[in-house]
Amino acid sequence: MLLEFGVSNYKSFKDRMLFSMVPAPKQKGLDYSILTEVINKKTFKSLCSSVVYGPNASGKSNIIGAMDTFKKIVLRGNIRNNPDSAYPNQAACMLELIPNLSLQQAEPVWFSIKFINDGLLVEYELSLDLGRFLEQNYRRRILSEILKINGSSVFVRTDKIEIGSLKTIEMFVGDLILKNAESAKDLAFANLNNEELFLTNGFKNIFSSSLVSKVVDWFENKFTVIFRADAMHMTPKFINHDSAIVVDNYLSKVAKEFGINSNALGFAKDGEKGDTTLYSIFSTKDKDNVKAIPAEIFESYGTVRFINTFPLLVRVLIEGGCLVVDEFDASLHPMLLMNIINFFHNDEDNINKAQLIFNTHNPIFLNANLYRRDEIKFVERDDVTHLSELYSLSDFGTVGTGGVRKDTDYMKNYFIDRYGAIKDVDIGSILNQLLQKNKDNK
């Protein structure tokens, strides 16, 4: 489960930003939405969900983009570009897009994360010299890299390598390495590369591939980050042949509950392109005669969005982990959203400690009966510096004129600018100018 994510010098977040899923102190109510894990007799708690508010261009998507970029760097094991014009988050592919564009001199980009996976408390952070914004030919290098397991330092990588006590991870390290730790460290240092992560290269190859597998597995399979929800496309693993349409009974059932215009849904592979296409299936009076057309032609946009979202929800609820989605609620009915969120909040349903994080403009989640104050977060961008700031509703406290209590009308106060992270938008004058200009030109 995710405990914390931190970043600095990532687009509009110049100063260090900490996205915490750790429950704030003295928060009462909705205690069922708290996840717990015990590591070395110490109890760690985390929120099962969080929702992020803020006006357009405030930096909400930059938080999710930073999570996605960090994940991609860890999985590929280096800070070299990996061009992919089709990938929604281009900063993960072209790292020169990351640094804050206001900087006159290069400053480090910093990522950190803290999570629990398979009984291990993992803390990992990176400090990178990526140059300035759009500086493509800059000689990048990793300034520092730190890994802690269960609170103990495993390694610190700067311009040298410091290996912590291997006894804390001895179950993942072979006897030969334990006996020859200094020689192994010297070998690792000799093969250090300024652009390659020590975690997934030297440490993995020389010290412990099994420990690194535990860390990387969480990034790959338990940390699902969708930078743009409209770019989600489900690709079922069971489709292994061409032309035949395979009906997904569970997906058809849930789609009928949600709203579907056809009789069922199915998938088929395109023999030439190899792409998987979702089909709407129709039964005719002749039961042996079944019609099918691509669902994007026949079903509503909201239905197709939900169909692409549903498998991700199922996966995270079955396997555990953290699902992070940019505008997860777009085109989905509020009652469906309430049902999904309540499922994550229900201890009897969410038995694998799944987490859901998303940003939104929909005010219905500003509800004390649905979300704790520490689960509601805001992003505000300064009009002068153009820098973003993240804060939580629980940061306001409960006393004084600015206090926020559980019986407060969160939605009302948000719209009267009690919490910030809202902007008065009026394009009426611009529209009037355009209409007047059009009238004058006639």
Image (spheres, rainbow, N blue to C red):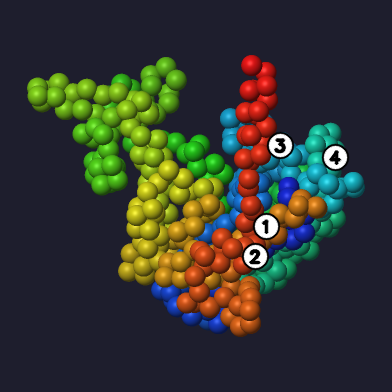
Q: Name the residue under label 1.
A: 380
Q: Are marks 3 and 4 in contact (CB under 8 Å)?
A: no
Q: Which is in the foreground here, disc 1 or disc 4?
A: 1
Q: Earlier in the sequence, mark 1 or mark 4?
A: 4
Residue 304 image point, x, y percent? 38, 37
Q: Earlier in the sequence, mark 3 or mark 4?
A: 3
Residue 382 vs 241, above or below: the answer is below
Q: Mark 4 points at which residue?
A: 139
* Residue type (three-letter) at the residue carrying disc 2: Tyr
Position of the C terminus by quadrant: top right
Q: Mark 3 points at which residue?
A: 94
Residue 138 vs 170, above or below: the answer is above
Residue drawn at (83%, 37%) of the image: 135
Query: Under tag 1, what secondary structure?
Result: strand
Residue drawn at (67%, 36%) of the image: 430
Residue drawn at (47%, 77%) of the image: 407
* Residue type (three-letter) at the residue carrying disc 1: Glu
Q: Are marks 4 and 2 in contact (CB under 8 Å)?
A: no
Q: Which is in the foreground here, disc 3 or disc 1?
A: 1
Q: Nearer the viewer, residue 158 or 322?
A: 322
Q: Quadrant of residue 85?
A: top right
Residue 278 image point, x, y percent? 35, 30
* Residue type (three-letter) at the residue carrying disc 4: Arg
Q: Do the residues labelled 3 and 2 touch (CB within 8 Å)?
A: no
Query: Under tag 2, what secondary structure?
Result: strand
Q: Do the residues labelled 1 and 2 touch (CB within 8 Å)?
A: yes
Q: Can residue 60 be seen in this view?
A: no
Q: Name the residue under label 2.
A: 391
- Give the Cα distance between marks 3 and 1: 26 Å
